[in-house]
Image: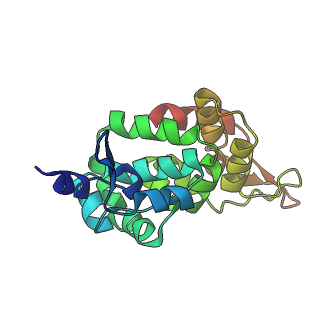
Amino acid sequence: VGLREDLARRDFTINAMAYHPVRGLTDLFGGQADLAAGIVRCVGEADRRFREDALRILRGLRFAACLGFAVEEAAARAMRGEQGRLRGVSAERVNAELCRLLTGRNAAGTLRAFADVIGTVLPETAPMRGFLQNNPHHCRDVWEHTLTALETSPPDRLVRLALLFHDSGKPFTYTEDESGVGHFHGHPAVSGRLADRA
């Protein structure tokens, strides 16, 4: 396999460059420009790259989270279109990428922008999105509250995993009192069970 063929099979342009001590840098797909611009772009057809290995979807989101990069429009569209394939990826591979994503400096922003994709591998997070708390102590829905907590936390894997699931039980324990104020009695135990299941 020649160098061009090898690089053409890579996932993202920023990962499709090669260096030779004599010939220097080979950058056939604009990786240097995307690196400078902070863009996650697929090599060639994005859909094809993700069909070859669906874990590349999470890998791209991990780059966005850790490097603060933006996901290029065609890549983002393909991630959403092929996200169902993530269900066929081993839990160990998914977990490795998710844990690295969560410790990224832009983890919350990436989770916010790609909540639907994250929900494919962590279905426990889906009910949190848009779930209003109707409580004077909470001005955000459960998902936004969770992301705000992530944004203000240290980039520690265990801390961020705990924060990601700490209120996941709220949608399942919601009640309203006679004044219409929302309450979540027993939600920590339910959140703990959901975290264990994930």
- Please tell me which residue is depicted at 41% across the width and 47% down the height of the picture: 59
Measured as percent of width and height from the top left, residue 18 is found at 31, 47
- Name, please, the residue furthest toward the front: 22
Measured as percent of width and height from the top left, residue 197 is found at 46, 35
Query: As drawn, is 112 to the left or to the right of 180?
Result: left
**Observer-nearest residue: 27 or 197?**
27
| Residue 65 higher or lower than 196, as above or below | below
Please indicate, yes or no, whether residue 114 appears anywhere in the rendered image: no
- Please tell me which residue is depicted at 61% across the width and 41% down the height of the picture: 164
Colouring style: rainbow
Please indicate, yes or no, whether residue 42 appears anywhere in the rendered image: yes
Query: As drawn, is 99 to the left or to the right of 151?
Result: left
- Please tell me which residue is depicted at 83% across the width and 58% down the height of the picture: 139
Quadrant in the picture for residue 168 = top right
Measured as percent of width and height from the top left, residue 183 is found at 78, 48
Query: As drawn, is 66 to the left or to the right of 130?
Result: left
**Observer-nearest residue: 162 or 33?**
33
Query: As drawn, is 188 to the left or to the right of 194?
Result: right
Measured as percent of width and height from the top left, residue 42 is found at 36, 62
**Observer-nearest residue: 60 or 129?**
60
| Residue 10 higher or lower than 156, as above or below | below
**Observer-nearest residue: 69 or 115?**
69
